[in-house]
Structures are given as C-alpha cells and as structure tokens.
Image (cartoon, coloured by chain):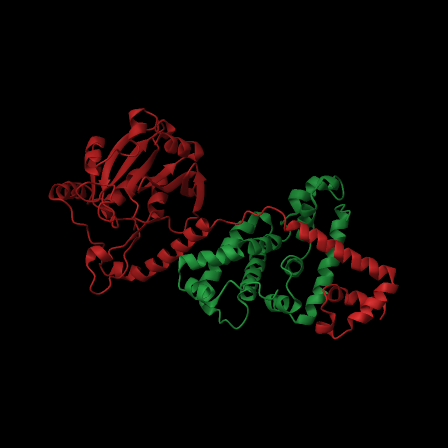
Chain colours: A red, B green
Amino acid sequence: MNCKQACELMSAYFDGELDSVTGESQNEARDHIASCEACAKELRSFEQLRNLAASQTDRQLTPPSWESIEARLNHISSAAFSADTDHASTCGIKPVPRDLPHKRTQLFALGGLLTLAASALLSFTLRVPPQKEGTSTSQASVATLNLQPFMELFGTDADKAMATLASQHPTADVTLAKAEAEFGRPIFVQTSVSSNSLPGDAHLVSTKLVQFPDCKCPKGACTCGPGGCSCVACVCQRPDGSTYLVLEHCKSQSVTFGNLPVQIVKRGDRHLQQVEVEGTTAISWEHDGERLTAIGLRGSQEIDTLLAKN
Amino acid sequence: MAGRDESINENIVKRASAGERAAQLDLYEYFRDRIFRLVRHIVGESDADDVTQECFLKVFAKLHTFRFESQFSTWLHRLVVNESLQHLRSRSRRKEYGQPILDEEMGHGAGAATIENAELLEVAMSRIEPELRVVFQLKEVDELPYSEIAEIVGIPEGTVGSRLNRARTELRDQLTQLGWEP
C-alpha cells in the first residue's frame, strides 16, 4: 500500500469500516501508517477533529419549544379542517347560535340590526366541523376563530374591522358596567380603565358583548356570563387616534391567526401566542380560566403594561 | 448506532401518525437535541430553529409513510437532512451562512485563542459544502455506521469514506486558517 492508497482509505480505516466497506485489509493500512510519518500525521489530525467535534456536544442547546411546534400543528390541523368545511360554508351552513336568555337575545338583535349594513366584505373564517350523526348541535358545535383577516384589517381600518366582526357574530354595544353585569365578573381592562393606565395612554371608547361560536365551557366553569356565554370586546384609543382591541372570551373558544407566524413568548408566568403584522402585535393567552386576546398593540411596552396592570 | 431508538416503538409512531399529541411529544423530546444539532450544523445557527420546526412538522405529516422496514431514526434523519439541504438550496444561503458573523470578528487566525473550540468548529463547518457537513456530523456527533449514513444521505456505502475524507481534510484546513491549535 502506498501513501495515495492509504489516504483514500484513511477515513474508513479511522472509523473501523475498512474491511466491511472496501474489502481492503485494516492490517495493510495499519502497517503502512505505522511506517509513514505523513500518513500517521493525517490520521492524528482526524483524531484531533473527533475530539473537537466531541466538545460541541457539551454546548448548551436551545432547540425550539414543543409549544411552538404544537401551535403550528394545531394551526395546520385547523387549516386542513377549514379546507374541509369551506365547501359547507358556501352551501349556506352557518354556525348555530347558542341559546340566549331572552333579554340578551334582544340586546344582540338590536346590535345585529345596527350592524347589518356592514355586510361581510371580509370573510372571517369560521370553522365548523361536520356534525356527527346523532349528536346535538350544542355537542357538535366546535369552531375555531381565525383572527388573521380581522387583525390585518384592524391594522388599517379598525372601525371597518369591528363592523365586520359585528356582522359575523351577534354583537351589542354596552357600557362597561353593563358588560360587567352581563359578564358576571370584572372586565379584564377594568383596573386599567379605572386608573387611566391603559397601554399607550389610551382610553376606552367602546365596549361590546360578542357571541363567539364555541364559547361552551363545562357546566359551572364558564367565566363569561351568569346567564349564558358572552364575550367582551373593549376598543381602546390612543391619543393619536389609533386603536387596539382587548377580547375577553371563554378558554374553550380556540383562536388561530391563520397562516401568520405565531411565536410562543413567555412573559412572567404567562405563555403568550404572539403575532406581529406590520408594526402591530396581537397576543392571546389564558388567564384565570378564560382566554384573552389583544390585537393592535404596539411594541413590548404596551404588552407589558397591559399584563402588569391586570 | 444499533438500538439508538430502542425506546421508540411502533406503537408510539402509529399513535403520533394518528395525530396523538402525547405521542408526538414523546418523539419530539426523544429526538429534539440530536435533530436540532444536526440542523444547526447544516443550515447555520440563525435558521436552525425555524428549520427544526419545519422538519418536525414534516415528520409528523409524513409519519404514515414510514413502513417500519428500516430504523425509525434513519428515516427521520433522512427526512431532516433532505429538508435542511433543500432549505439551503431554495434560499441560496450557503454564501451567507456563518461567514459574516465570526469571520469578520476573527479574521484568519487573529484572536483565535480567545474563541472556544466549538465556535471555531462551527465557523469551519460553515465554510465547507453542506453535503460534507452532513456526513461529518452524522459520523462524529451521531456516531452512525457507514451503512446508516449511506442510507440517510442516499449514497453508496463505499462513497461515505471518501466523502468523509474530504470533509475531514477541508475542515482541518479551515480550522488551521482560523488559528486552531489542537
């Protein structure tokens, strides 16, 4: 064996694969290397590389979190699901409204009439799976709320976005006190409103009760309304006229942001789904048995302020 | 490495394939570090997180195609390697990867003594071809036999040695330029 042959076989020899892979004898290579300083040096350099590579396994690794992958898996599942049900939607199948107490139904009906003119120029994707035979509407009604179109429109025309939201879901304008009475507990932004410390020096400009499609908590666990589920949407306006929205809804109402990239961000003890679109941020997180979603926030300072005050 | 995925049994793979989150989590936690390290060395640090996520999403989407005729880890590695190389090809990232960051700070040899050896290796790895990075990583970090490397990369078993020769000599040369003192 000469040097050229030995060099060609060097890795296989070094890795103990020579006999099995090439049919060349491990012994022949060993004999040559033992008598050749240049080849021995080459072999030593391989050994040094191996030691160097071993050192990298000691380095701290920060692979992506399972939560970030799971969020994307959930999104993919709901997107596939949406594709399955898009056809149903175009055939006129709509989410079935939840039974409401009579008074509340009137309230929503009034809001619905007022917003009827704001027909759905946009389509908020409402995903309703096919109902299983033999199941009741309330058992089978599971819908994921895709907030991507709303978020994108909200960034350019918040009023139009809210009008479209109202055209998609029963909505009623109420006072904060009324919302609180209907909701059955203090509204999330109540503390900030009372102390004039809403993020971005904003003030509350409207409060709405909104009926989302999948607000169906286990009996006794519902956090949004003593007489039936309803959600609260608070629109807050900054001094420059821009707005953001804080949605307070049932934890069982699943929310996605379509195909926008969602990051899972840990702030304090909260894990937030966070989405950025053209300078505005949306976050969604679980809080005290319910889900909160804020859309239109600017920067981490507003997020921190919102979380800190509530 | 024989028996490397002995705790990944057929049942877990089938449950994960059916979309069961707990089983998917088991697979993820079992392979996470290994795959992340491999991806990082192929695509570079900045894209490693995204590509690792993409790889696992693709793994879960394609699990139903795994026929249990080979080791699960081999199937998984093959998918990850292909996905990572495809990422590099589609974004023409090779020239960008790695070089602007440490190279400019380090020059060639200057100040190298203050750089951790592992960082030196990362820079050197970024300077060789992605296909060479892959075989080096699979051999030196994952400690796979040539037969499995060949299956993952899709080359004849006899070619693995020559590709490793190139990877090792080119890496050594790059490291030497960076001031590596073994």
How many labels were placed on the picture? 0
Query: Which quarter of the picture shows residue A46?
Result: bottom right
Instruction: Residue B64 in the image: state x and y as whole percent.
Output: 44, 68
State the quadrant of the N terminus of chain B: bottom right
* Foreground pick, A3 / A237: A3
Residue A70 drawn above or below residue B146: above
One can see residue A187 in this view: yes
Instruction: Residue B89 in the image: state x and y as whole percent.
Output: 58, 58
Residue B133 drawn above or below residue A301: below
Outermost residue, left direction? A102
Lateral position of residue A131 relative to residue A295, left or right: left
Residue shown at the point (37%, 58%) measured from the top left: A77
Instruction: Residue A33 in the image: state x and y as whole percent.
Output: 84, 64
One can see residue A119 in this view: no
Query: Which quarter of the picture shows residue B138?
Result: bottom right
Residue A19 drawn above or below residue A245: below
Outermost residue, top direction? A195
Residue shown at the point (26%, 58%) measured from the top left: A89
Lateral position of residue B17 relative to residue A183, left or right: right
* Foreground pick, A106 / B113: B113
Instruction: Residue A91 in the image: state x and y as whole percent.
Output: 23, 61
